[in-house]
Amino acid sequence: MDNLFKILSIALITCITCLIVKPIRPDFAILVSIVGGIIVLFYVITSFSTIFDVFNNIFKISGVKTSLYSVILKIIGIGYLTEFTASICNDTGNSSLGDKVLLGGKIIILVMALPVVSSILNIVMELLPQ
């Protein structure tokens, strides 16, 4: 909960700073926005250990191959990174490029998710009576 207030505070301070700086130096306002976003990401990263622990428990209980664990974490990372990059593109006025970044991220996620879906289907098929 403490990290949430830090994240919200940094985001609000960054937005207010951008509003003040943008009329004077629009190029600098973009940099302030990017730096604020990176600082927020650093606070978010501190919560990853809890997420990793939960995923480890899920994989131990479910019987899914542990090699798929890294694939799922990569998929989640790709999702967040593409969303972050697309937001930066949109903030800089390149919404068309941001849309293409999102499309590329979704396609890469789909390709990477195929082994996970296949593994889950195999587990379900083993559970069904024959």
Image (spheres, rainbow, N blue to C red):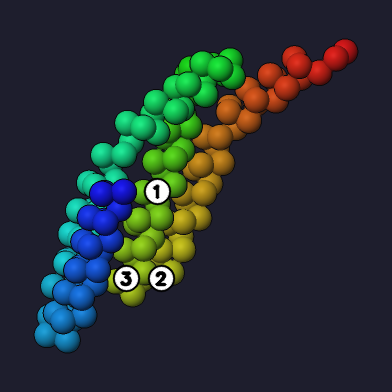
Residue sitting at x 18%, y 59%? 35
Q: Disc 1, disc 2: CB below 8 Å?
A: no
Whole-percent x, y for residue 57 in the image: 48, 21
| Residue that numbered label 2 is attached to | 95
Label 3 sits on residue? 91
- Position of 69 relative to 112 (above/below): above
Marks 1 and 3, how far apart at CA: 16 Å
The picture places residue 94, in percent across and down from the top left corner, at 36, 71
Q: Disc 3 to disc 2, how far (Cα)?
A: 8 Å
> Which image quadrant is residue 15 in?
bottom left
Image position of 67 (left or right of 21): right
Q: Considering only vertical position in the picture, is 13 above or below 58?
A: below
Callout 3: SS? helix
N-terminal of the pair, mark 1 or mark 3, is 1
- Give neighbour class at mark 2: few <14, some 14-19, many 20+ (Cα, 10 Å): some
Which residue is at 65% across, 25% downward? 120
For disc 1, the neighbor class at 10 Å (few under 14, some 14 to 19, many from 20) is few
Can you identify the residue that label 1 sits on?
A: 80
Could you tell me how far apart the alpha carbons at marks 1 and 2 are, in whole angstroms? 17 Å
Residue 41 visible somewhere in the drawing? no
Q: Are marks 1 and 3 in contact (CB under 8 Å)?
A: no
Is 120 drawn above or below residue 105 in the view shown? above
Q: Residue at x 51, y 42 (%)?
A: 109
| Amino acid type assigned to the residue bearing label 1 in the image | Tyr
User: Which residue is located at x 52 percent, y 20 percent?
Assistant: 59
